[in-house]
Amino acid sequence: METILQMEALLPPPADAGRYRYQTDGSTRSMVTHTDKCTDCGAAASIAFGQSVAGASLVWFKSTRCASCGMAIEADDYGLPPNEIRDEIMESSGRWGLQITVEGPKRLQACKILHCDLNTTMEEVAPMKNRMPGVVYTGTRTEMEWLHGRLTQFGIESNVVQQPDDANAQSIDIACLKSIAFEDRKLR
């Protein structure tokens, strides 16, 4: 995870870039940094968190460091990050969508891939298939790049496209899927 902390910023900063800095390598990593009060000494602590794709898995991390007292906390895991981290990534970089452009029999193949990777229920597969061609899911840019990469491995045409805010999102956020809404949100 150490390499994530050394990425170059390729996207312009968001309009409200005072507190956050969003960094990405253009396709598979995102990171938000800001400062907050140290829980040990009250001085300013540096906090960084984000997502990346490691092989075929989606992973997240959070790092907190205080230069004043030396307090340091590191956390990382597979799958979707905790809601508060994911919400801040979304606030900083926006909502992104996975647009699947295939029709016909390739739609079924796309459904199988997404069903396996997201561990969706069978009742969630039909609505996903009905949204093709089009935006089938939304989430963070890294999440959508991860799904796009998985589809590309199997020759399924798709794109990652920026979406409007929550109120106007065109599709279902992957964090709202029944299969992911439980405590075990590990996606591999």
Image (cartoon, rainbow, N blue to C red):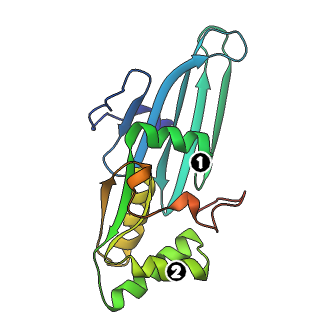
Q: Residue 11: name its quadrant.
A: top left
Is the residue marked by circle 1 packed among few (<14), some (14-19), or many (20+) residues within 10 Å?
Answer: many
Q: Position of residue 27 (x, y in %)?
A: 34, 51
Q: Is residue 133 left or right of residue 169?
A: left
Q: Position of residue 58 (x, y in %)?
A: 52, 56
Q: Residue at x 31, y 31 (%)?
A: 13
Amino acid at pointer 2: Val
Q: Secondary structure at mark 2?
A: helix
Is the residue marked by circle 2 packed among few (<14), some (14-19), or many (20+) residues within 10 Å?
Answer: some
Q: Nearer the viewer, residue 117 or 125?
A: 125
Q: Residue at x 66, y 23 (%)?
A: 72
Q: Residue at x 72, y 57 (%)?
A: 183
- Marks 1/2: CA distance? 23 Å
Amino acid at pointer 1: Pro
Q: Nearer the viewer, residue 90 or 69?
A: 90
Q: Is residue 188 visible?
A: no
Numbered label attached to residue 96: none
Total numbered circles: 2
Q: Which residue is mark 1?
A: 81
**Looking at the image, is mark 1 or mark 2 nearer the viewer?**
2
Give the quadrant of the C terminus: bottom right
Q: Residue furthest front?
A: 167
Q: Position of residue 156 (x, y in %)?
A: 33, 77
Numbered label attached to residue 125: 2
Q: Residue at x 36, y 25 (%)?
A: 17
Q: Is residue 183 left or right of residue 115?
A: right
